[in-house]
Image (cartoon, rainbow, N blue to C red):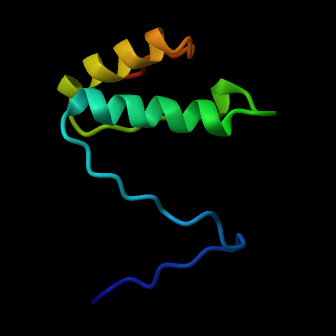
Amino acid sequence: KGKQLWTANGQGDPITVFEASDEGAEANFVAGKIIAGSQGKNFKDYAILYRTNAQSNALEFSMKRNGIPYRVIGG
């Protein structure tokens, strides 16, 4: 039996699909999106979820290079 998904919230932003050529390009895309969307917001309002710990290296490098403060929880 399937579940019926619902929310009490209004409609949010559409989902963005991006196919990166490698993990560096993916991390740079994520950092760019954070920088572009951060006007008037705090970096602490963002979270990046990744499936494997191996993905964290490229993301951490890109965050450092772009001056985006971050902390890794878990991993």
Residue 75: x and y in percent read: 29, 21
In the image: residue 38, left or right of residue 1: right
Residue at 35%, 13% (x, y): give it: 61
Question: Residue 8, relative to residue 50: is it above or below?
Answer: below
Q: Residue furthest right?
A: 40
Residue at 28%, 20% (x, y): give it: 58
Quadrant assignment for the N terminus: bottom left
Question: Residue 72, relative to residue 42: is it above or below?
Answer: above
In the image: residue 28, left or right of residue 20: right
Residue at 37%, 58% (x, y): give it: 17
Residue 72: x and y in percent read: 42, 18
Residue at 51%, 32% (x, y): give it: 32
Residue 6: x and y in percent read: 56, 79
Residue 42: x and y in percent read: 73, 27
In the image: residue 64, left or right of residue 9: left
Quadrant of residue 9 within the rendered picture: bottom right
Quadrant of residue 11 within the rendered picture: bottom right
Q: Nearer the viewer, residue 21 or 54?
A: 21
Camera sees residue 75: no
Camera sees residue 11: yes
Question: Residue 25, relative to residue 71: is it above or below?
Answer: below
Numbered circles on residues, count? 0
